[in-house]
Each structure stands twice: as C-alpha cells, then as structure tokens.
Amino acid sequence: MRAVYATAPDPDDPLSALVVGHRPDPEVPPGWERVRVRAASLNHKDLWTLRGVGINHDQYPRILGCEAAGEAPDGRRVVLYPLLDFPPGTSDETLVMPEAQLVGARPGTLAEYFAAPPASLLPVPDHLSWEEAACLVCTWLPAYRMLFTKAALSPGNTVLVQGAAGGLSTALISLAAAGGLRTWVTGRTADKRDLARRLGADATFEPGTVLPEPVDAVIDSVGKETWTHSLRSVRYGGTVVVAGATTGDAPPARLHRIYFHQINIVGSFSGTREEYGRMLTLMRTTGIKPLVDQVSPAEEARAAFKRLADGDVRGNLVLTWS
C-alpha cells in the first residue's frame, strides 16, 4: 500500500526523513478490521516522530499519522480511536501504557489502510465530511476533555486559550464558545486573532497581555513561551491545563505562585469514548465543525508537513489518497 513514512529519525532536519512510497499492508489480527483511509490529518506528534522523540532507532521505517477517517469492510464511516481498553485499577482508557496504544505500537494512519479492533472504530456523524471527521479524535476529543473534564468548566466560566490558529486551538475555541464559556484567546498576529473571533472568541489579546481579570482556567499547549503568562492569568484556585509544549517543556516552574495561589496544574491527554459521545452531541446541537485549512493529496505530504513545522496553519491540514 502507499504510505507516508519516516525512514529514520532526524532531529535537525526532520523533513529529510519523510517519504511517500510503498509499505506492506497492515497485519489484521483475528477479530480486527481493515479500514480504507479516506482522509488523515497531520499532527505535531508526527513531527516528533520525524525527529525521533521517544522512539527507538530500530522502530524505523515508521508510518506516520495518528488520526484518520475511513470505511470499514461493511461500509461504516469510522474514525480510529487510538487507545485500547483501560487496565484494572485505572480510571479510564487514557491512562493505558504506551504498549496498549494503537498509534505508536502499530503503523500509523497516513496510509491507504490501517487495522484496528472494532472497539477502536468510532462512528462518524453523517453531517461531517471525511476531511472534517479526520480531525475528531486527536484534536477535537482532547480539546473537549481539557475544557469540560480536566478544567471542569461550566457555562459562564472564563477560559483563556493560549494560541489562536492551530488545530487544537481552533477546536478549543469552537468547543468553548459552543459550550457557553466566556472564551478569551491569545494570538501572535492580527489575522490569527481575527480567526479566533470568527470561531466564537469573546476577546483576543496579544501574547503576554495582562488580562482584564483572572480567568477560571487556562489551556496551554505552547509551553515555555506562555507558561509564566498562564500562571499570572489564572485566578486563585483556578486551573492550568497542560496540553502540550510546542515551544519547549522546561519553563521556570514559578512554584511560589502555584502554591500561594493554590493553582491546579493538570495534564491532559487524549479523551475517552464516553467523552467522544458527549462531544458529538454538542457538535450536533450547535452545528460546529472542525476547521480544515487545506486538503492535499498524500503525494504532497512534504509541503503540508513544512507548513505544520513552520506554524503556518489555520486549523487542520488533511491528506487524502486518490
């Protein structure tokens, strides 16, 4: 089958390791299903794979991709849920060990086919296109969990989203506004802040701006560049959800502020099947959809990944197979 894959890790020039070519069809264990991929979105996790972050050299060549939408053998429209059932003694399936994660332990989704057990194939709403559906599980589902489970926000609460234009940020803004939250957003450029307002943000600010008042929660996927601002922006007893670290993962801790202001620092990863169902209900009732910046044939993967690496994205980048 055709696939987009990394030949070897290259931390200095990650795109040099990217190839669009042929790889073996996925193995289909008994009881699993082979899904024909119709659309797959790009994720920063793919850039980490190209750089070799957290992956052994002997795991290359490696097919990229962590989310996709496609057709099951019986014609069902499905997306891949990348986690297996949660182990005894843990609260939910997001806490599985790495070896129990479908994406990582097996080939990725940037290929013509992937294989998964039926429990990891979630339904796609009819009102979403293939390209929109390809953004649901690794972008929108984590955003929903951050807002409504980890930060436990309710209508009328105020949330600050650090970042205005990427796939996760646009999902956070859309879901927060649809969920009745007062939604504030930081963005580096005027056009990104304009985009946030079009998606439903109530107010936008340049990075580092002192806010009119403290917020109930901050969602921070930026990391080092925004960490101090996040801690200064949240109210006493509020929550900062750590959702990534695209600019670095070792900022000043500011421990005095954390303990004196009793700030809750919460990590968030993926989302549960139950949260997926609640998210779809919110999407159906409000009509919100993922923002797809560009759809490209998989053969143009290198150009799409360059845009992702450069931060030149408004929403999600999606690849399709002809």
Image (tube, grey):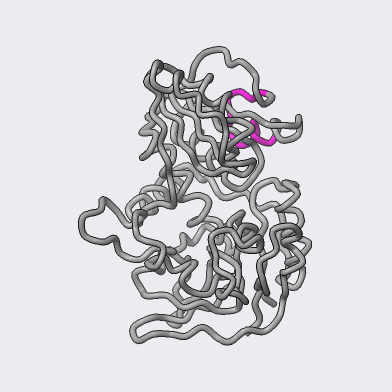
User: Which residue is pictured at 46% across the width and 71% down the height?
Assistant: 105
User: Which residue is pictured at 64% across the width and 31% down the height?
Assistant: 197
Q: Is residue 129 magenta?
A: no
Residue 245: x and y in percent read 57, 43
In this rendered view, identify the residue nearer to me: 127 or 223: 223
In this rendered view, identify the residue nearer to me: 81 or 78: 81
Q: Is residue 281 above or below residue 179?
A: below
Residue 238: x and y in percent read 40, 23
Q: Is residue 258 above or below residue 321?
A: above
Residue 212: x and y in percent read 57, 12
In this rendered view, identify the residue nearer to me: 87 or 9: 9
**Apparent side of residue 27 relative to residue 298 in the rendered image (left or right):** left
User: Which residue is pictured at 38% across the width and 81% down the height?
Assistant: 32
- Specify the quadrant of the image occupied by residue 83: bottom left
Q: Quadrant of the N terminus?
A: bottom right
Q: Quadrant of the C terminus?
A: bottom right
Q: Is residue 196 magenta?
A: yes
Name the outermost residue toward the top: 212
User: Which residue is pictured at 45% across the width and 27% down the height?
Assistant: 217
Task: Look at the image and give the residue range highlighted in magenta.
Answer: 195-205
In this rendered view, identify the residue nearer to me: 283 or 67: 67
- Specify the quadrant of the image occupied by residue 221: top right
Q: How many marks?
A: 0
Residue 321: x and y in percent read 67, 75
